[in-house]
Amino acid sequence: MEPSGAPSGPAACVAFSRTRKGLVLIGEIALCVLALVCYGASRTPGYTGLAICELVFAALILLVWGCRLAPRINFIHWGWTDFIRCVIGCLLFLITSLIVIIGHRDGAGTAAGIPRTAPEPQTRPGSPQNSPSPRGGQP
């Protein structure tokens, strides 16, 4: 039961979203959505899973804290859970960005840290593949 002056239901979630921790979680969710858009716009959208997982985990933590479920579920230490989630997410984004930033070439991929796919082989203008056949198009 809640004290008489404390908000309950949706009002508690809105009140939590105005706290410092709530604003940080909402900012993290917004950045995950931005990373998801960048990953999806790049030529290799295979890294979207990382952004989706971090987005879901941040939304779950926001839901737990916003609906005041953390005091009711006391067998989980929510402070450490949130801290470990942040550290793992930070390391995964950092590692992914460092791995793929080495081979970036497109704009959206650079913003998301996505590698470029293998380029098409280039032929020279005077090579036999590009020159017209002397028989009028017949090999």
Image (tube, grey):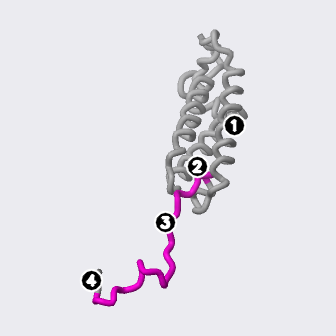
| Residue denoted by label 1 | 91
Find out whether the residues at labels 3 and 1 contact each other: C-beta distance under 8 Å. Answer: no
Q: Is residue 25 left or right of residue 60?
A: right
Find out whether the residues at labels 2 and 1 contact each other: C-beta distance under 8 Å. Answer: no
Inspect the image, locate mark 1, and give the three-letter code of the amino acid beneath it. Leu
Q: The C terminus lies in which quarter of the figure? A: bottom left
> Which residue is drawn at the image coordinates 63% and 34% (left, top)?
17
Inspect the image, locate mark 3, and give the three-letter code of the amino acid beneath it. Glu
Front tag of 3 and 1: 3
Q: Is residue 42 left or right of residue 80?
A: left
Q: Is residue 85 above or below residue 42?
A: above
Label 1 crowding class (10 Å Cα cut-off): few <14, some 14-19, many 20+? few
Label 4 crowding class (10 Å Cα cut-off): few <14, some 14-19, many 20+? few
| 3 or 1: tag closer to the N-terminus | 1
Magenta stretch: helix, strand or loop mostly: loop
| 3 or 4: tag closer to the N-terminus | 3
Inspect the image, locate mark 2, and give the three-letter code of the amino acid beneath it. Leu
Q: Position of residue 108 (x, y in %)?
A: 57, 58
The local secondary structure at tag 1 comes to helix
Q: CA distance from mark 2 to mark 3?
A: 30 Å
Front tag of 2 and 1: 1
Q: Is residue 97 left or right of residue 63?
A: right
> Which residue is drawn at the image coordinates 50% and 46% (left, top)?
46
Q: Is residue 120 above or below residue 6?
A: below
| Residue denoted by label 2 | 34
Q: CA distance from mark 2 to mark 1?
A: 18 Å
| Residue denoted by label 3 | 120
Q: Position of residue 135 (x, y in %)?
A: 28, 89
Front tag of 3 and 4: 4
Q: CA distance from mark 1 to mark 4?
A: 58 Å
